[in-house]
Amino acid sequence: MKKVLLRMLSVSSLVLLLAPQATRAQGVLYLSNLGETAIGEGAIGSNACVAQMFVTGTNAGGYLVNSVQLLMNAPSGSPAGFEVSIFSKNGNPHSFHFPGDVPTNSLGTLAGPNPAIGGTLTYVSADGIYLSPSTVYFLVLRAATPTNQGAYSWSASSASTPVLTNSFRIENSYFASADNVNWTWVARQKMFQFGLYASAAPPPKLTIGGSGPGSLKVSWPNVGTYTLQQTASLDAPNWVTSPLVVSNSAGSNFSTFPGTNGTLFFRLKQ
C-alpha cells in the first residue's frame, strides 16, 4: 500500500514531504466478462448509443482507469466516428433506482481504433479517468454516423446474473438511446462485453502551512477515507493513529499541529 509521509521537526525547522509517484502502467484487470459466451450484440451509431452499467470496488481512494478492452463484432456498412467514454449518472452515485438514474455526465473518452474487424480492441485513457469507490458508472459507446449508413457491433453475453470480480460488478442491465440524451432502461436481457484495467488511486498528497503563532496545519484533499498516523522514527516497526483532531470540510481535511522539538513522521493509511 502506498503511503504519504510528512516529516515535522519543529515549528521553525525544515519540513520534508514525500509524495507517491503516480504510474501509468497497464494497471490491473479489475472487471471483465470477456470470457463469457457471446449470445447477442448491439448496434452502435449516432442514433444507437449503448451504456453498460457497472459498479466500482471499495478502494478508499478510488481508481484511475488505464484502459478498456471491448469485444467487438465486424461492423456492417460504413460507420465512422466510433467513441468510447465513461459516464456518471444523476442522483445518488452510490445507489441505483430503476429506471430513472440515467447516464448524465461524461467523465472522459478513451482513445483507440475504429473497429474495422471483429475482435478484442483496446482503448486507452491517457490521463486516467478517476472513479470513486462503490459508485455506479456507465461505459458508453456511440458513433458519428447513423445506423442506416452502417453500424458497429458490440458483443454481448448472457445477463442472467451480474458479473462480480475484485469487488467490481457489471450489472445485468444497460441503457439504450437514439440521441445520447433520452435513455431507455433494458434489464436482464444481455450484458455487453468489456474488460476494465485500472490502478488503485494512492492516498492524496499531504501539505503543510502556518496556522497562527507556534502552530502548523497538515491538510489533504477530502477524497476517500483515510486515517492519519504518526511515528517518531521510520525505523520503528509500528505506526499509531495520530492523536491530532482531524477536521473536515467540503474540499479538504486538516489537523492543527502545535509543533515539537522532536521528530515526527505522518502518513495517511487506507
Image (cartoon, rainbow, N blue to C red):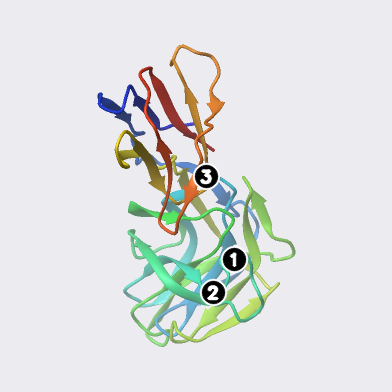
- Between 256 and 131, the one lying in front of the other is 256
The circle on residue 42 is 2
Residue 62 visible, this orientation: no
Q: Are marks 1 and 2 in contact (CB under 8 Å)?
A: yes
Amino acid carrying label 3: it is Leu
Q: Compared with residue 67, is residue 145 higher up or lower down, i.e. above or below?
A: below
Q: Position of residue 241 (x, y in %)?
A: 56, 30
Q: Earlier in the sequence, mark 1 or mark 3?
A: 3
Mark 1 vs mark 3, foreground winner is 3
Q: Earlier in the sequence, mark 2 or mark 3?
A: 3
- Between 211 and 148, the one lying in front of the other is 211
Q: Residues within 10 Å of mark 2 (few under 14, many from 20)?
A: many
Q: Compared with residue 47, is residue 141 higher up or lower down, i.e. above or below?
A: above
Q: Position of residue 88 (x, y in %)?
A: 48, 68
Residue position for label 1: 156
Residue 98 visible, this orientation: yes
Q: Is residue 192 left or right of residue 142?
A: right
Q: Residues within 10 Å of mark 3 (few under 14, many from 20)?
A: some
Q: Calculate the distance from the C-alpha at mark 2 to the C-alpha at mark 3.
A: 24 Å
Question: Farthest top residue?
Answer: 235
Question: Farthest front residue?
Answer: 213
Residue position for label 3: 29
Q: Position of residue 13 (x, y in %)?
A: 25, 24
Q: Label 3's element?
A: strand
Amino acid carrying label 2: it is Gly
Residue for point 38% across, 43% down: 219
Q: Calculate the distance from the C-alpha at mark 1 to the C-alpha at mark 3.
A: 19 Å
Q: Position of residue 216 (x, y in %)?
A: 34, 36
Q: Residues within 10 Å of mark 1 (few under 14, many from 20)?
A: many
Q: Are marks 2 and 3 in contact (CB under 8 Å)?
A: no
Amino acid carrying label 1: it is Ala
